[in-house]
């Protein structure tokens, strides 16, 4: 029983460490495409694809909403600011910019998908 408790304690500490390491004070957390896939399969999430319309139309994740970064600043999003929002682009650069913009607008739980659609298509 002591070994089980020790293993559980180590796993909990490792999980907390991972969360602290991958998130910052701003409320933006980077996650990989495997984590996104898991959440898509097990939860109903808001996923913004911040690529341009032609990129989005060329292929996107089912259920993703196109909100191009180029017009995101002028767009009022209809999502509650205290609920999780996931952001993806082609490689991870525009999603990081969009996540920062969302944070500045008051969104409190933002997930930036590392590697973007390039990583998604390689999985």
Image (cartoon, grey):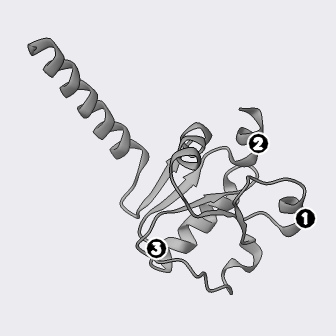
Q: Is residue 95 above or below residue 75?
A: above
| Residue 112 drawn at (x, y percent) | 56, 55
| Residue 16 drawn at (x, y percent) | 29, 40
Which part of the image, by quadrant, shows the C terminus? Answer: top right
- Dot 3: element: loop
- Disc 3 to disc 1, C-alpha distance: 27 Å
* Nearer-the-camera pick, 93 or 19: 19
- Residue that mark 3 sits on: 107
Numbered tag placed on residue 118 in the rendering: 2
* Rendered image quadrant of residue 35: top right
Q: Name the residue rendered at 36%, 60% in the picture.
A: 25
- Residue that mark 1 sits on: 54
| Residue 121 drawn at (x, y percent) | 77, 39
Q: Name the residue rendered at 74%, 80% in the picture.
A: 71
Label 2 vs 1, first from the N-terminus: 1
Label 2 vs 3, first from the N-terminus: 3
- Dot 2: element: helix
* Rendered image quadrant of residue 100: bottom right
Which part of the image, by quadrant, shows the N terminus? Answer: top left
Is residue 50 shown left or right of residue 78?
right
* Rendered image quadrant of residue 51: bottom right
| Residue 42 drawn at (x, y percent) | 51, 46
- Disc 2 to disc 3, C-alpha distance: 26 Å
């Amino acid at each position: 029983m002591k070994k089980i408790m020790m293993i559980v304690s180590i796993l909990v500490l490792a999980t907390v460490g991972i969360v602290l390491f991958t998130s910052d004070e701003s409320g933006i957390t980077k996650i990989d495409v495997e984590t996104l896939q898991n959440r898509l399969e097990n939860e109903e999430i808001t996923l913004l694809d911040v690529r341009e319309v032609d990129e989005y139309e060329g292929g996107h994740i089912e259920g993703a909403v196109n909100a191009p970064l180029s017009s995101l600043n002028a767009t009022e999003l209809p999502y509650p600011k205290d609920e999780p929002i996931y952001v993806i682009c082609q490689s991870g650069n525009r999603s990081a910019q969009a996540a920062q913009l969302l944070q500045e607008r008051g969104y409190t739980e933002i997930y930036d998908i590392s590697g973007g659609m390039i990583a998604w298509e390689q999985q």
